[in-house]
Image (cartoon, coloured by chain):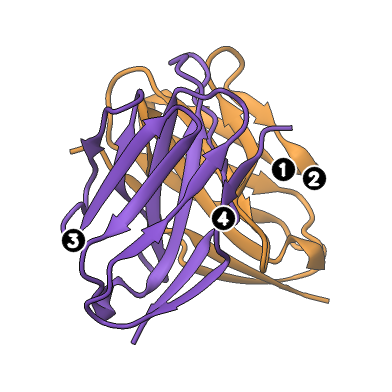
């Protein structure tokens, strides 16, 4: 069965630190890849997406992700996090239906 | 803006009650989904629908059913609520285009079964 793995369950950083959240998926065909973010008390919203083309995609709020097909990975990065980035982050693969990872809780301290 | 609206933000129900969770989207999306979100487990798919009156089981359909009588509305039904169904329930919708499968989510319904 297709699956999505997020390796970091809880990440704690200080402001200005760099961030990389890992995501791997198990499907070998063509996929759509997403990162969604859920800020405290808010609904899930799209951070960035990859459908095709340039494997380095940029999203909102300075986030970016790189699709590495050979590694089945779609890691999320941000060079310098802010306190307002405190949220839960979900990687997802869509094969018609969305398959989500277990989420990574990010806490950023001032 | 796409809007997905869930009828309740918080619900408290008793064990054995029949519970209805309603979801409406206003962008003419073909696909609609119900997930439950639990800490450490991420989002798990309960049921989804590609068209009116059509439904497919997701990964954890036991204890749930769904109804899609109109394109814009997708209801999740807990036939006899149990305490292990206490969770956050998320509704989502997507276009029917496989080249654009971005999901739009409702604000969630936090259900507590006592």
Label 3 neighbour load within 10 Å: few <14, some 14-19, many 20+: few
Q: Secondary structure at mark 2?
A: helix
Say left or right for A3 vs A46. left
Quickly name the residue at label 3.
Answer: B63
Quickly name the residue at label 1.
Answer: A63
Q: Earlier in the sequence, mark 4 or mark 2?
A: 2
Q: Are marks 2 and 3 on the same chain?
A: no
Q: Tell me the number on the disc at residue A89.
A: 4
Task: Judge by depth and name the residue closer to the eye, B90 or A15.
Answer: B90
Measure the C-alpha gap from mark 4 to mark 1: 12 Å
Q: Position of residue A55 (x, y in %)?
A: 57, 22
Q: Are marks 4 and 3 in contact (CB under 8 Å)?
A: no
Quickly name the residue at label 2.
Answer: A61
Q: Tell me the number on the disc at residue A82.
A: none
Label 4 neighbour load within 10 Å: few <14, some 14-19, many 20+: many
Residue A68, above or below B12: above
Colour assigned to chain A in the rendering is: orange
Q: Are marks 1 and 2 in contact (CB under 8 Å)?
A: yes
Residue A21, above or below B81: above
The chain to which mark 1 is attached is A
Say left or right for B5 vs A85. left
């Amino acid at each position: 069965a297709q699956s999505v793995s997020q390796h970091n369950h809880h990440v704690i950083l200080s402001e200005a630190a760099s961030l990389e959240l890992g995501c791997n998926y198990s499907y070998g065909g063509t996929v759509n890849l997403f990162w969604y973010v859920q800020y405290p008390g808010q609904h899930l919203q799209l951070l960035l997406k990859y459908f095709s083309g340039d494997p380095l995609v940029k999203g909102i709020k300075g986030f970016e992700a790189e699709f590495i097909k050979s590694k089945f990975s779609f890691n999320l990065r941000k060079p310098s996090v802010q306190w307002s980035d405190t949220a839960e982050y979900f990687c997802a693969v869509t094969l018609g239906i969305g398959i989500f990872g277990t989420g990574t809780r990010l806490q950023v301290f001032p | 803006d796409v809007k997905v609206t869930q009828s309740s933000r918080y619900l408290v129900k008793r064990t054995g009650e029949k519970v209805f969770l309603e979801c409406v989207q206003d962008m003419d999306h073909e696909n609609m989904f119900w997930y439950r979100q639990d800490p450490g487990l991420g989002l798990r798919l309960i049921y989804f629908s590609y068209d009116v009156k059509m439904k497919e089981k997701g990964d954890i359909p036991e204890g749930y059913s769904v109804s899609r009588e109109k394109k814009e509305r997708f209801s999740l039904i807990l036939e006899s609520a149990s305490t292990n169904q206490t969770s956050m329930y998320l509704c989502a919708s997507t276009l029917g285009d496989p080249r654009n499968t971005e999901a739009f989510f409702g604000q969630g319904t936090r259900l507590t079964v006592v």
